[in-house]
Image (tube, coloured by chain):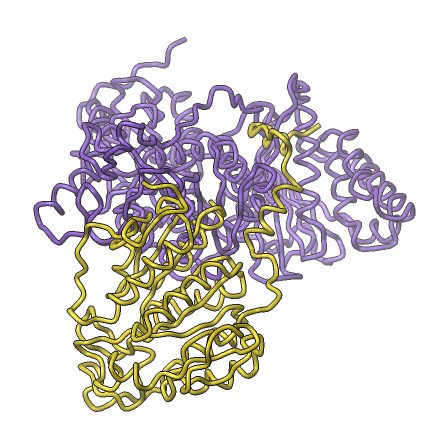
Chain colours: A purple, B yellow
């Protein structure tokens, strides 16, 4: 019995690949499995190839996993377009439509899979449902038969999906589903692919993706204004808010461009509301100037970047983590703004709430880095304890302060009480031009230096917040993994595999990726002789930024790769093994055996 | 602060000393804004005054309202965000011709079609003054400036025709040469329920052409006169009769931008539709629960 299984399916547009994946996710959540699903599409608007990759396990999951255990190819042309996203290995069971006429020992693959089974998927669909459109239902039946996936939950899903259709369509699909199961039962697999039964969850689990979670968390955090412009792969954030925000007393503006989107959000923040915008790389480029305005005017703002492959239009539908330099350094002038990153769908809740809290507490724009993988991937997660989430609001001036209000007053923390239009006595001039404490425009060099100091120094206490860094492992371990964003899940899983081999290591996942906390990183690296910074970019951007601010161990290396070329736990483990060998060669004591 | 009804122009005047050149038309606009604000009856803290970059855009700082001197070309999006966030505020926007019709041109069309209740005052001087005399989008063809030393090769933007073409519901033009008229128009713009556009021919005394200074404005201006809407006002001899509900005729008059200085209301929608923020408020009312619980939002994701 398997406790962890990676499954993928690819086909043409209209094959219902994604809806089959979603049906599997819903059934998995209901029956107590943990699951992560990524979807991938060609760039066609309609009718292009589509695929999903789904990892199903009896324990919580960190990432989408490595090579496929089971691959379903509705047709080979479409399957092969996904390349490394759907990696078939010698341990993969391949299921494909026999209509292709390709012999199972002559598949168009670079490796010979463990087993390949041609199934008359289309023929069964036509025979039982009278249409090719039921191919996905046949596949669901096959998976129930071969993998032991929850039959009742999937059946309920099929019924629900076709509830609104004619009884003919419903009946056809139910028959197609049964035919898939029957075929699987009549043709047992050589390798067992049966998944172990899961414990039904005590509390209903959640199923969502990072974009929807980000939008929901924004509402929870008290966001009441969103201004934005549609851009892949972030658009679902605006779509969700366009539906929901009004119910919570807020407003959503689909602006004429990215600049107007963030401009309106800054305006709403000036007016005292928690405001947000969301975009992806090209949009971030356009928003740069107004981000700087929010910095100098000290206005809270959350700006989400769901990163995709770049530069320019790049790979709009693929994930990458190559906008970190941009997030940290795209401002002109000495504008330091907090950049925080989410590592998973579940983590997106806390990260988004944190983004609002930091923005409000420090009166600054906060860039929240997500990526296409987190944004688009669906996860089954535990319910979120919202009572544990603190909400921070900006500090308004009190009556005494309003008597002689000084908007940018120097304070111990560098944060000044902030008023908003409508507040009597709080009148002030917000400006992009340098200003005095009272808000009057100035070109005085000394004032400029003091105000820069105020705006940068107010973030010192943020860098000291250790709760913005997830550190686990032995405190004095000689080997370290550092990672961020969606790839952090790969690092976490690799760390688990390494520990099982007796490698002593520790893992640092920063939620605050900029400004770099010299203290936290410095302390972390104190015991470290070698390690990897793992990320999805060509240059290894976090690796380089850390080295700008921190003296890192000489053995710290970058494991970085352009987007759409997955990094797997297995290859991280390989690198770690090599590192251990090298360290041993240098006379470093052997790692101690793991406890127990 | 005195009670709402008794605010005087002085109550809107801040301590900052304008950086404008002596004789700049923008001083007149500022005075007119003070007077119109006093007439509006809205105390300074209920007013947000947003601007972009340019000589004109310094204006919010010279008032005691909440001001926002933002970045070049972007005051309209920022002002819309403010108004949508707090519809109860009076929101004014100031731009120059560069801010409004060059770098921020895109936002004008969309602010108009969105119809957020803003009063948009463009101080149009047909030159870039703050950066010392470059070509502007409303500079006339052939004009020699430091960036067009051999003469401009471009036709100017016609701001009046542009906004009328975009469907603007309130379109007016004035000049500080006519302080009473300018004050009245700004006040009318504030009172108009919807996006109001006022093009103010505000001369640049340093880089502007001699023929577009206040003195020449005074001589050249042709007030638009509407006997139907203002029967009590005496028709000035130089006036041109115009029905401000006649949009096509307004466009004909707008054609003369740069040739004839018409002042007054070109067009005012006689039956203004609800503004964006009114519709947004209605939508919230219809969708919002009495006391929404924000943590409930996660219920959307529960698999049952």
Q: Residue at x 68, y 28 (%)?
A: A194
Q: x and y percent of residue B39 in the render? A: 40, 56
- Relative to B184, A252 lies left or right: right
Q: Is residue A91 visible?
A: no
For this rendering, which residue is in front, B254 or A85?
B254
The answer to whether residue A449 is left or right of residue A45 is left
- Across and down, in percent, residue A464 comes to 25, 26
In the image, B116 versus A241, the foreground residue is B116
Q: Residue at x 83, y 53 (%)?
A: A123
Quadrant location of the C terminus of chain A?
top left
| Of residues A561 and B89, the one drawn nearer to the viewer in this rendering | B89
**In the rendered view, would you say A201 is above or below A239?**
above
Do we see residue B262 in this rendering?
yes
Q: Farthest residue toward the right?
A: A168
Point out residue B245 in the picture as x, y percentages from the top left corner.
57, 75
The residue at 32%/70% (across/down) is B179
């Amino acid at each position: 019995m398997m406790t962890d299984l990676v499954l993928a399916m690819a086909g043409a547009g209209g094959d219902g690949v994604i809806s089959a994946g979603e049906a599997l996710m819903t059934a998995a959540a209901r029956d107590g499995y943990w699951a992560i699903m990524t979807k991938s599409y060609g760039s066609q608007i309609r009718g292009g190839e589509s695929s999903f990759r789904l990892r199903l396990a009896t324990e919580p999951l960190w990432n989408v996993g490595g090579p496929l255990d089971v691959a379903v190819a509705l047709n080979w042309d479409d399957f092969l377009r996904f390349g490394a996203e759907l990696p078939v290995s010698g341990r993969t069971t391949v299921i494909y439509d026999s209509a292709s006429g390709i012999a199972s020992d002559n598949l168009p693959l670079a490796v010979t899979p463990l087993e390949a089974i041609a199934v008359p998927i289309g023929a069964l669909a036509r025979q039982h449902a009278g249409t090719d459109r039921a191919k996905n239902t046949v596949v669901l039946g096959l998976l129930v038969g071969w993998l032991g996936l929850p039959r009742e939950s999937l059946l309920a899903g099929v019924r629900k999906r076709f509830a609104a259709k004619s009884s003919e369509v419903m009946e056809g699909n139910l028959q197609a589903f049964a035919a898939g199961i029957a075929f699987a039962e009549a043709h047992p697999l050589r390798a067992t692919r049966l998944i172990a039964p899961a414990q039904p969850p005590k509390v209903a689990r959640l199923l969502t993706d990072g974009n929807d979670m980000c939008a929901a968390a924004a509402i929870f955090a008290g966001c009441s204004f969103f201004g934005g412009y549609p851009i892949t792969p972030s658009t679902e954030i605006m779509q969700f808010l366009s539906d929901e925000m009004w119910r919570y007393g807020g407003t959503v503006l689909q602006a004429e461009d990215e600049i107007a989107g963030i401009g309106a959000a800054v305006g709403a923040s000036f007016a005292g509301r928690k405001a947000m915008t969301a975009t992806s790389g090209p949009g971030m480029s356009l928003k740069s100037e107004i981000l700087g305005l929010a910095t100098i005017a000290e206005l809270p703002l959350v700006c989400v970047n769901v990163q995709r492959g770049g530069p320019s239009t790049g790979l709009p539908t693929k994930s990458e983590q190559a906008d970190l330099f941009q997030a940290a350094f795209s401002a002109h002038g000495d504008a330091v703004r907090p950049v925080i990153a989410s590592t998973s769908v579940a983590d997106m809740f806390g990260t988004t709430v944190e983004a609002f809290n930091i923005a409000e507490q420090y009166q600054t724009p906060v860039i929240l880095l997500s990526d296409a993988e987190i944004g688009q991937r669906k996860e089954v997660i535990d319910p979120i304890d919202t009572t544990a989430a603190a909400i921070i609001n900006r500090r308004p001036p009190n009556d005494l302060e309003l008597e002689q209000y000084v908007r940018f007053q120097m304070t111990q923390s560098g944060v000044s009480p902030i008023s908003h239009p409508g507040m009597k006595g709080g009148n002030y001039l917000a400006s992009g031009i340098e200003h005095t404490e009272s808000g009057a425009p100035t070109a005085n060099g000394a004032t400029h230096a003091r105000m820069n100091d105020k705006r940068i120094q107010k973030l010192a206490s943020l860098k000291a917040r250790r709760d913005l860094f997830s550190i686990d492992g032995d405190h004095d371990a000689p080997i370290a993994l550092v990672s961020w964003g969606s790839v952090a899940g790969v690092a976490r899983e690799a760390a688990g595999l390494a520990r099982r081999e007796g490698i002593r290591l520790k893992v640092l996942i920063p939620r605050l990726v900029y400004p770099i906390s010299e203290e936290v990183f410095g302390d972390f690296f104190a015991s470290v002789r070698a390690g990897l910074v793992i990320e999805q970019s060509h240059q290894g951007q976090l690796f380089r930024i850390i080295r700008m601010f921190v003296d890192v161990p000489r053995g710290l290396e970058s494991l970085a790769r352009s987007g759409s070329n997955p990094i797997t736990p297995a290859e991280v483990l390989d690198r770690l093994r090599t590192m251990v060998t090298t360290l041993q060669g240098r006379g470093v004591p052997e790692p101690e055996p793991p406890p127990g | 602060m005195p009670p709402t009804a008794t605010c005087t122009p002085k109550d809107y005047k801040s301590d900052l000393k304008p950086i404008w050149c002596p004789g700049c038309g923008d001083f007149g606009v500022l005075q007119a804004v003070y007077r119109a604000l006093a007439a509006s009856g809205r105390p300074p803290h209920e007013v947000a005054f947003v601007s972009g970059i340019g000589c004109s855009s310094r204006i919010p700082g010279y008032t005691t309202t909440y001001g926002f001197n933002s970045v070049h070309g972007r005051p309209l999006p920022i002002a819309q965000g403010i108004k949508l966030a707090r519809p109860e505020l009076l929101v004014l926007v100031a731009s120059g011709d560069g801010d409004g019709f060059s770098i921020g041109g895109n936002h004008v069309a969309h602010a108009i079609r969105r119809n957020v209740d803003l009063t948009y005052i463009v101080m149009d001087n047909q030159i870039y003054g703050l950066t010392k005399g470059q070509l502007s989008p409303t500079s006339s063809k052939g004009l020699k400036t430091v960036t067009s030393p051999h003469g401009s090769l471009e036709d100017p933007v016609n701001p009046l025709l542009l906004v009328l073409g975009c469907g603007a519901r309130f379109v007016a033009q004035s000049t500080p040469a006519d302080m009473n008229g300018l004050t009245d128009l700004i006040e009318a713009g504030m009172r108009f329920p919807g996006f109001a556009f006022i093009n103010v021919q505000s001369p640049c005394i340093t880089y502007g052409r001699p023929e577009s200074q206040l003195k020449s404005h005074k001589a050249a201006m042709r007030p638009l006169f509407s006997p139907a809407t203002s029967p009590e006002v005496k028709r000035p001899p130089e006036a041109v009769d115009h029905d401000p509900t006649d949009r096509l005729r307004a466009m004909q008059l707008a054609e003369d931008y740069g040739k004839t200085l018409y002042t007054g209301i070109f067009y005012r929608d006689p039956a203004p539709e609800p503004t964006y923020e009114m519709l947004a408020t209605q939508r919230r009312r219809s969708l919002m629960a009495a006391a929404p619980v924000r943590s409930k939002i996660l219920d959307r994701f529960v698999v049952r």
